[in-house]
Image (tube, grey):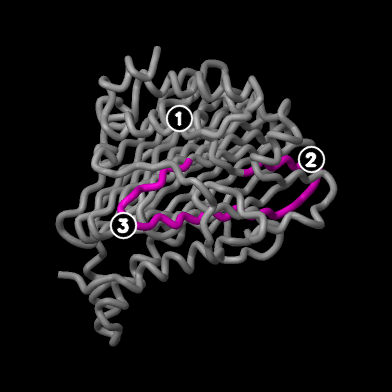
Amino acid sequence: MSTQQILPELSPASQALVAMHGGVPSGDADWLAALRADALARFGQTGLPTPKLEDWKYTDLKALNGANLVRPVDAPAANFGGQAGHRLCFADGRYVAAASKVDDLPGGVTFLSLSEAFMDMPDVLRSHLETADAGALADLNAAYLDGGAVIIVDGAEVTLALEFLATGEGSQMSAFHPRNIVIVKNGAQLTLLESQGGGGVYFANHVTSIAVEDGGRLNHVKAFNHSSEAFHTSLTQVHIGADGYYGSAVLDTDGKLLRNEIRIELAGEGAETSLAGAYLARGGRHTDHTTRIDHLAANTTSRQIFRGALDGKARAVFQGNIVVAEGADGSDGRLANNTIMLSEGCEIDTKPQLEIYADEVKCAHGSTVGELDDEALFYLRSRGVPETQARAMLVEGFVATVFDEFDSLEGVQQLRDGIADWLAGLEPGA
């Protein structure tokens, strides 16, 4: 289907995103050029997801229609946080070698930018870049592949950092599409510290593909701290082999609209995952955390706990789905979502789900929505704690506990500090 045929059927933002493909540099290998073209054709048939799709019922990207979407040309100057240790840094999706540190890696560790990996290991990448069944935003990401990292840890133990910084300026909205590929094999243990943020106006569309092979362990600590005018979509797909483990600790504190989607396949017997997420929103921002965990093998375990606090007419969405496939006997899946409303005019759409097609399983799910405990607030006030500080203490005690399981990991204290920073802007209650 040609671009001329499909553009009239798409939203203005989708049309602009398709039209950008004329600016993609030539010179790709034949297989990569074909992958880009196929992905763009699929995106051109659907465009950006809309609330007509069940998974997008509560999140609408229509605000992108009024944006002047452009493809970034060069990696701009950027001030990175300077994570200690081994790191890869990206500005507007483009690799910044001068800010990165990839020397003195332990044996068994491959840590490259995606652009370098295209040259050094194309055969490894091909199977991990396919997105035919991952949705429109994954197809859009595959059509552009603006950068990202390739990480392979083979029988080693290491901590690595990824830092993505956006520098949107002026009336134009840069649109970029990083792709990370992570493979943990032969009993390796990886702690991955990922930060995403920036200033100005931009649309960041991230996709991360993770394979934790038999016996491997990956702890993924991620902080979203975007500009108040930013749009961010993130899809993380994880495949876990026998006795493998994937842990995720996520903090989301800013951005005009954020969608964080995590899909996990517990594919081998004894595979395990634990997800912890905290979302804090004010000022009319929209945040969406959507998860799906498929128990595909016997004796697999999943834990999910997401907690949030909303203020100032913010809106949050949580959609969590646990699916236990036929034959996945002995599976144990637990899911909880809890949200505090700090002022009038906030909204939470929460939809925990269970689908069970096996016998002898232990699964549970639930959600709660409420306000701060008046008695606890009165107790603190009666002991001389100012109202704003008392409210902040109660919110922190409620939200920050989601990270207790991950406290021993590097990077988790930064998540707790991020909660405290957000609470510093809390207004007194009505």
Q: Nearer the viewer, residue 246 or 80?
A: 80
Q: Which residue is mark 1?
A: 22
Q: Which residue is mark 3?
A: 281
Which amino acid is tagged 3? Ala
Which amino acid is tagged 1? Gly
Which quarter of the rendered picture does the C terminus lie within?
Answer: bottom left
Image vertical order of residue 348 relative to residue 266, above or below: below
Which amino acid is tagged 2? Asp
Name the residue: 61% across, 54% down: 96
Q: Position of residue 337 (x, y in %)?
A: 37, 46
**How far apart are the two marked residues, 2 and 1, measured between alpha carbons?**
39 Å
Image vertical order of residue 281 relative to residue 388, above or below: above
- Label pair 2/1, CB-CB below 8 angstroms: no
Judge the density around disc 2: few (<14), some (14-19), many (≥20) Cα neighbours within 10 Å: many
Image vertical order of residue 24 relative to residue 391, above or below: above
The residue at the far top in this view is 1
Image vertical order of residue 245 relative to residue 30, above or below: below
Disc nearer the start of the sequence (2/1): 1
Name the residue: 39% across, 15% down: 2
Q: Position of residue 22 (x, y in %)?
A: 45, 30
Q: Is residue 369 visible?
A: yes
Which region is colored magenta? 149-176
The residue at the far right in this view is 107
Magenta stretch mostly in which secondary structure?
strand
Is 396 positioned to the left or the right of 237 in the image? left
* Residue 163 highlighted magenta (yes or no): yes
Disc nearer the start of the sequence (2/3): 2
Is 423 positioned to the left or the right of 322 in the image? left
Is 181 positioned to the left or the right of 102 in the image? left
Q: Which residue is mark 2?
A: 154
Count of numbered marks? 3
